[in-house]
Amino acid sequence: MSVKLVIGDFSKSSWSLRAWLVLVTADVSFETLQIKLEQSETRKRILEYSPSGKVPALLQDGIVINDSLAISEYIAETYPAANLWPQDSATRALARAAAAEMHSGFTHLRTQMSFGLNTGDTPESLTTETQEDIQRIFAIWNQLREVSGSKQFLCGDFGIVDAMFVPVVFRFRRYGVAVPARLQGYVENILAYAPVQEWLKLATQEA
Ligand SMILES: N[C@@H](CCC(=O)N[C@@H](CS)C(=O)NCC(=O)O)C(=O)O
């Protein structure tokens, strides 16, 4: 069974990062196919693999799964031993809601605090809407850690919900967002997680 993950630049593609983290966490054996974003040929090249014109896309046995969340769900189903969602159904429902909220929302944060790992631009000052997004993210993290009782990641071991928020942790670090004391351990655990370190290394090499 050959598995390929089509991704964008390590330094630019936060959605690729999420899917890549899920595959690496589940110990999937896969090849990475990288397409540089923001080039004249980018759209044409992505469309050779992904009909949505977006990365990431997972190619396996003749099927294409585009979208980071759909890829994550597929990997969770295919590799149940990886425990990518919490075991407890109520905690799992909350983790899914948080992942979905990240996947479909926080547009102010995503627009004002761009992901670019190798660029130095910083916003003048955060808008009220971006600050509200940040507070909402802190509330989600606190709630999940309280409900799950986890001192490690949001719901115990690193899972899909954590992968969804890794780019946010990078943004907080890059833009100097003060993280409440009770969540600092979470941010440190994310930044110390070996696959996260590996992605950061690849992004630095890309520069
Ligand atoms: N909802 C999609 C969003 C994917 C997305 O927006 N990907 C960006 C890169 S991070 C992309 O492919 N952009 C195409 C381009 O820049 O031409 C997902 O979760 O995978």
Image (spheres, rainbow, N blue to C red):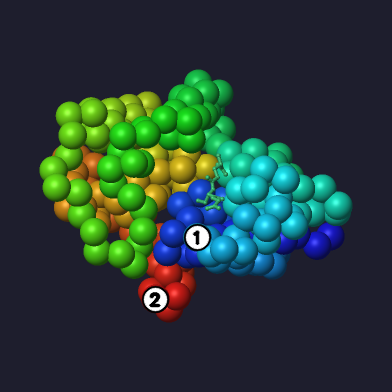
Picture coordinates of residue 3, whole percent (x, y): 75, 59
Of the 4 image quadrants, the one containing the C terminus is bottom left
Residue at point 32% right, 54% down?
170
Work out whether residue 98 or residue 9 is closer to the camera in this orientation and state it. Answer: 9
Give the residue type that dot 2 points to: Ala
At x 43%, y 34%, the residue is: 102
Of circles 2 and 1, the one toward us is 1
Element assignment for label 1: loop
Q: Which quarter of the figure is the N terminus placed in?
A: bottom right
Image quarter of residue 120:
bottom left
Ligand 1 lies under 8 Å from the Cβ of mark 1: yes
Left or right of 91? Residue 180 is left
Depth check: give the residue in front, 202 or 184. 202
Q: Position of residue 51 (x, y in %)?
A: 72, 45
- Percent x, y for residue 198? 45, 69
**Which residue appears farthest toward the top when viewing the image?**
90
Q: Residue at x 46, y 52 (%)?
A: 14
Left or right of 35? Residue 29 is right
The structure residue drawn at horizontal position 19% and vertical position 49%, both measured from the top left corner, is 123
The residue under label 1 is: 38
Q: CA distance from mark 2 to mark 1?
A: 15 Å
- Mark 2, Cα crowd under 10 Å, few <14 / some 14-19 / many 20+, is few
Q: Which residue is mark 2?
A: 207
- Tell me if residue 138 can be seen: no
Instruction: Confirm or reject: label 2 Cβ below 8 Å from ligand 1.
Output: no
**Amino acid type, label 1:** Glu
Residue lying at the far bottom of the rendered structure: 205
Circle 2 sits in a helix, a strand or a loop, which is it? loop
The numbered dot on residue 18 is: none
